[in-house]
Amino acid sequence: MADAFVLQLLGRGVLEFNEWRRSYPAEPVVLKGADLHGRNLRGANLSEADLSSTNLTCARLDEADLTRANLEHATLIDSHASRLTINATSFLGADLSRAILARSCGSSMPPVVGAAISKQQTLTFKNCRLRGADLDNAVFRSADFSRADMSHASIRGTLFEQCSLSNVSFADTVLGGSVFVDSNLSTAENLPQAFHRGPSLLDQKTLRTLIGTGSNEFLRKCGLTKFEMLTARLFEPSLLAGEITDIAYEICEARMSSPIQTRSVFISYSHHDRVFVEHLERYFVASNISFWRDAHDLTAGRLESQIDLAIRLNPVVILILSANSIASDWVEWEALACSRFSYQPI
């Protein structure tokens, strides 16, 4: 439960609140479960605060200090939180849907007088736990996610621009419509284990960071064709003349032997038919067909909205019909979703 005295101090304004923090640094800040909807907390010193299960929807958190703060299961939907200091902060299970955590957002605004402004100039999620967090449609610019745990998180429609993603765990992270611009994925972990609800976009600078890292499976699931992945290999600076020639021949063969796929494919199936779908997946991979599968056991985000987005991103839907799928409520939901978007399932 939130501390009534701390809530009262926040109500008086950030200036007075930060002055109290400087005067009594050892005093705990407990705001657990508080309703801070729409509050202006710009520049607030919330380091080591307990903000678990707090409602921060539409709150202004620009330049706030959240070092070692606990935001587990907090709601930050549509919040503005640029230039945060977030070292070792826990966002376990937090909902950051449509949150704007950009470096430049609100940067022209004058700083809050007396606020604990961090010297950190870029948004940092170093060592943060973002496991299971909902980061859908969030915007991250010049953000440092080094060694963050993003496993089981949802980053559908999320923009990562000029971000450091070194040693970030992508185990079972949900992608789809995700955008990586000038971001370093060279040392990202568990990329093959990421789950793709649809194609994602990587610019050339991001793509070059993955050259030679064995990330072909990740790139294929992002929607790149064999032809595109081979072409990207030509940017590898250590290639010898003979290797360049060999790749050029492979590019020519891939371009001539495989048709250009203009529509992506989404496979709807009952998990009891997983073995059959895995056989179908191997055939699609061998045929250079881009596809995405459903995942009814994912933990990030509402499943209904995940299915709708996946079908919107993949206009060709293959329904695997069997006794198991006919009895599956989720397969029925996906078939109905196809009809809502006027798609004809195969």
Image (cartoon, rainbow, N blue to C red):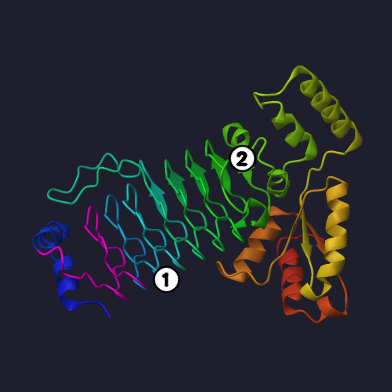
Q: Does 63 appear in magenta?
A: no
Q: Secondary structure at mark 2?
A: strand
Magenta region includes residue 50:
yes
- For residue 149, say whether it is visible: yes
Residues at badges 2 and 1 in contact (C-beta under 8 Å)? no
Quick one: SS at disc 1?
loop
Residue 274, by quadrant, is bottom right
Residue drawn 57% across and 32% down?
205
Q: Is residue 310 above or below residue 211?
A: below
Quick one: 338 or 171, which is closer to the camera?
Answer: 171
Q: Main secondary structure of the magenta part?
A: loop
Give the magenta range.
Answer: 24-52
Image coordinates of residue 335 in percent, x first then y, are 77, 69
Apparent side of residue 8 relative to residue 54 in the rendered image (left or right)? left
Identify the residue position indicated by label 1 in the image.
73
The Cα atoms of the two marked residues, 2 and 1, are separated by 30 Å
Quadrant, the N terminus: bottom left
Picture quarter with the C terminus:
bottom right
In the picture of the structure, the residue carrying the numbered disc 2 is 202
Residue appearing at x 65%, y 72% in the figure: 297
- Which amino acid, by three-letter code, is at mark 2? Leu
